[in-house]
Amino acid sequence: MAVAQVLVLFLTLPFFASLCQGRLSSRPRRFVTHYRNGHHKGTGASDLIDRCRLEWYSATLDHFSFSQHIKADENTFKLRYYICDEYYKKRGGSLFVYLGNEADVTLYLNNTGLMWESAERHHAMLVFLEHRFYGKSKPYPAQKLGNHMKYLTTEQAMADYANIIHHLKANVLEDVEVPVIGFGGSYGGMLCTYFRLKYPSLMDGAIAASAPIWTYFGEGYDRGSFAKIVTHDASITNAHCAPNVRRSWDIMMNTFGTTKSGRDILGKTVKVCSALENEEDVKDLVDMFAESWDYLAMGNFPYESAYIIDGEGVLPAYPVKAACEYLNEEFDSDEELVSALAKAVGVYYNFSGSLSCYDIHAPPSSETENFWSYQFCTEHFMPMERDGIHDMFYDQFFNTTAEIEACQNMWGVHPDTNRGLVEWQGKHILEFLSNVVFSNGLLDPWSGGGVLQIPADLQRRNNLRTVIIPEGAHHLDLMFSNPKDPESVIHARRVENDMIASWIREKYMITSSFSEQ
């Protein structure tokens, strides 16, 4: 079995997928969550977007070409961003910028509590930038986007952000020396890291939360770490959960999945919307159920949260534990076990309680999932595997040749397998990077590809820090404070705020020394 890509992102988000007739799975896993069109509310009592103003920037379509399209209006497009300036003070102020990742920017505006809660202390103007091709920042009408995917790259997006930040400093704040602090989670955290490396004069420091920058070829990444951490999250809830999950896949695929009568029993037991016609349908059902555990682990927050499901509903506190409650026993029959598994994955899929059946033929929930699959097939080709031995899943070997062929069939592109090492420096990036905090929660499956340790000499010389949150899931530290927060995330935010303050002081000291010369 092939493992095709990543999730929330990022993250969001490599997604595990089966190759079907030379195509990538229609169910890509992004870094963060399933994106839905519309407005994304946060977890707070009020809608924060009302405290901001909407702006549009005329972004250059291709920052790396001097040629022009025949039609002048095709050389630029409108990129959406929000400015929230209630705490900004011109004297001693700062600019906080969220580098948007693979979703509608309002998702990040309404959920990035660290920015909102730190703004008053640092007299910061908050800016939330939307990534090209996502949300409402479309270079072309929807029906034409697929013909222009070559403009969807991390480099182009960072160039968008660089030009907007320059515009904000020069024309909005009229202060080209204002300290700028970047924020990002998952793929957004990766963007912060790479932006700080490429445009250090435009960003004075960055909080890179749950940023799996070391998940590429040649970086010594444990391809099975994502699945192992999901399994760890399930294993610490009760002794039965992970073994029952592992056992269920064989029952679904081999006990029930190989005969029509077995598939009929399976479909009725787990309540699918249409008959399971063949073994491929059963595999799609298995992949769908397995994927839910990945999202539950990423959203394994200590309190109820709407983030992973984009404000469409609410997941319970520690949703992995809630799901595992259905599997906390030894089952007498195979049917009882798969029925319990269906209820467990319903914690994610049936958060509203209104889902009557599982639809294995449902298309991607939006264009966003397709767009991230394109980014996987070009720049973010991240190998991930499961083996069913060291994790609670089943054998999914990452077949590089097959994955590349699938990308060529689906998008007509060939993944750059050296991108992580060449463009983004691989493990050597720390030698050239400065003023970045890397935070990772150990309940987050993406932490396996994150920066968990930095040599002491590089910490001192380059002002780099790691913050580990043992009880944290996917960029928990970026969320709003909650009475149920573990002490480790409270400490993480304290460290991050202190680092932000030091970067701002440093920038003002440098600016002052220049002005005196």
Image: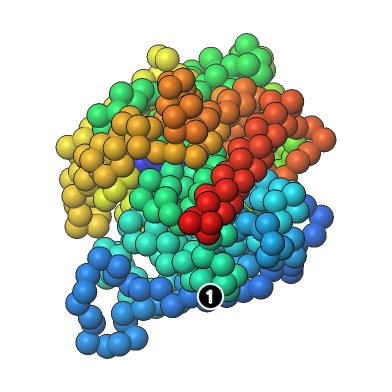
**Left or right placement of residue 495 versus residue 435 in this view:** right
**Residue 407, placed above or below residue 282:** below
Query: Residue 308: percent from the left, percent from the top?
Result: 60, 45
**Residue 237, placed above or below residue 291:** above
Check the image and tell me how it is coloured. Answer: rainbow
Q: Secondary structure at mark 1?
A: helix
**Residue 424, placed above or below residue 177:** above
304 or 57, which lies in front? Answer: 57
Q: Quadrant of residue 279?
A: top left
Q: Residues within 10 Å of mark 1 (few under 14, many from 20)?
A: few
422 or 202, which lies in front? Answer: 202
Question: Image point 44% across, 33% down: which residue?
Answer: 462
Query: Residue 25: percent from the left, percent from the top?
Result: 35, 46
Query: Residue 410: percent from the left, percent from the top?
Result: 25, 55
Q: Quadrant of residue 14?
A: top left
Q: Residue furthest front?
A: 517
**Left or right placement of residue 199 versus residue 304 in this view:** left
Q: Using the rendered image of the protein, determine whether residue 419 is visible from the camera's viewpoint.
A: yes
Question: Image point 66% across, 40% down: which residue?
Answer: 497
> What residue sits right under mark 1 in the picture?
171
Amino acid type of the residue tagged 1 in the rendering: Asn
How many numbered discs? 1
Quadrant showing the N terminus: top left
Q: Using the rendered image of the protein, determine whether residue 373 is visible from the camera's viewpoint.
A: no
Question: Image point 30% across, 28% down: which residue?
Answer: 219
**Residue 151, placed above or below residue 206:** below
Query: Residue 229: percent from the left, percent from the top?
Result: 50, 23
Question: Image point 23% across, 32% down: which residue?
Answer: 399
